[in-house]
Amino acid sequence: MPDFDYDLFTIGAGSGGVRASRFAANFGARVAVAEDKYLGGTCVNVGCIPKKLLSYAAHYHEDFADAAGFGWHLETPKFDWATLIANKDREISRLNGIYERLLTGAGVTIMNGRATIVDPHTVQVGGKNVTARHILVAVGGWPVVPDIPGAEHAITSNEAFHMPTLPRRVAVGGGGYIAVEFASIFKGLGAQTSLLYRGERLIREFDADLGTTLAAEMSKKGVAIRFKTSIAAIEKAANGELMLTLSDGSKLTCDLVLNATGRAPNTRGLGLEQAGVALNEKGAIVVDKNYQTAVPSIHAIGDAINRLQLTPVALAEGMVVADRLFNTATRSMSYDFVPTAIFSHPNVGTVGLSEAQARQQHEVKIFRSTFKALKHTLSGNEERTMMKLVVDAKTDCVLGAHMVGPDAGEIIQGFAVALKCGATKAQFDATIGIHPTMAEEFVTMREPVAN
Ligand SMILES: Cc1cc2nc3c(=O)[nH]c(=O)nc-3n(C[C@H](O)[C@H](O)[C@H](O)COP(=O)(O)OP(=O)(O)OC[C@H]3O[C@@H](n4cnc5c(N)ncnc54)[C@H](O)[C@@H]3O)c2cc1C
């Protein structure tokens, strides 16, 4: 048996890489991980965590307005971007420290720098070759920047977390979850916000009612949404203003453009192809059900394999790999009923099949309710909540649960357990609601609105 420096070398200390490295080390493996930017990866540094902190900040705008109907009279609240960003940065560095301690505490060696693959058992970091029995590629994804004139004047979500000031007028390009989240953040923090999307429905990979309800609610909150419109060119004026030419020939002036038009696996220039690892047309690493690539000693997980770009999915995949290589090899990963939330204003929560997906395979019954939450009877807020269940007409199993409304992610997380267990609509009906909540509506929808 050849002698290697490590049993496992992980490239990328993001969600998946840290979890796999830590678990492998706990199973007794000698592990090293290379990271070229920030411990914790996208989620901790420029993704889920800072995004949700900004989303909380932005929601106060509406909360202050809602408070008036309950008798609270505040002087005009003032917002300070610099305070928010400084506090957010402090929290992120605390998390970076936690990640470092988690790794070193488990006995994992951290190597700072960009790693590339030299051969199936060799990685290069900082000009030094390191050998390993197994290599795990967990390099995540990176924003795709549209190829338009003046693209260099726009930012991506990566830079949005570090802007020195909050711009007055913002144009967000895109209609996916990152686009709607940032449009909601900017609007909530007080910027005049346009959302420009070449498609006809927001968050189009999800149930159609989610996208249409979200567009209506975001519009009510003041986001100017333009469908079938994309940014064709950006010019920067001498005074710093950005002049946009849109795909329909119209013009828009703003102070910031954020492109949120997609992300791609961060797999370029890693030496993967030379080592014999196959990539698909999107640059995603091709793996089998055990996350093994075409090269038996190289595995890959997370956004780099582009299955579901979510932190909990990358974590679960990382644990499968660690278990398979260094423990009992009994852990597996199911992609069915993976719940997810979008932290737009209002929030979106979803699990299971959309109505359209369900109709392709099943006869369905659709239950839907749209209502004004109790809180808004006094707040005067016009926001409406939408809940929807997609039910298999033959088996009565609930195939999908979808919601647009406050705390949708918190609510859907609980229902995801029920769907994963194969809950039927009759069992939903037999569950006593918690009154008065919004969530009780999920167990009190009696009449289908469509078959
Ligand atoms: C704005 C935004 C918001 C998001 N919000 C959510 C959310 O609310 N919920 C959710 O579940 N998911 C969210 N995500 C997605 C989530 O962040 C990713 O799915 C998750 O981080 C993927 O984990 P990963 O381990 O595959 O990659 P990452 O976390 O991206 O980690 C990859 C790491 O590899 C490093 N790296 C890359 N190449 C090399 C190299 N050659 N050498 C050394 N190091 C390298 C990178 O610097 C990075 O630290 C969000 C993403 C974005 C961009």
Image: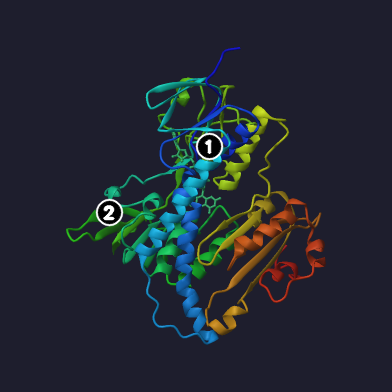
> In which quarter of the view is residue 371 placed?
bottom right
Q: Please state which of residues 105 and 367 is positioned toward the viewer in this rendering.
A: 105
Secondary structure type for disc 1 = helix
**Residue at the extreme top of the image, as rendered:** 1
User: In the displayed structure, does residue 204 sit left or right of residue 367?
Assistant: left
- The answer to whether residue 124 is above or below residue 163 is above
Quarter of the rendering occupied by the N terminus:
top right
Residue on which disc 2 sits: 234
Looking at the rendered structure, the number of numbered marks drawn on it comes to 2
CA gap between label 1 and label 2 equals 46 Å
Mark 2 surroundings: few (<14), some (14-19) or many (≥20) residues within 10 A: many
Which residue, given by chain and number where applicable, does mark 1 sit on? 104
Residue 109 in the image, given as x and y percentages of width and height: 50, 31
Q: Residue at x 55, y 66 (%)?
A: 213
In front here: 175 or 50?
50
Question: Among all residues in the image, which is located at the extreme bottom?
Answer: 71
> Does residue 37 appear to the left or right of 48 in the view shown?
left
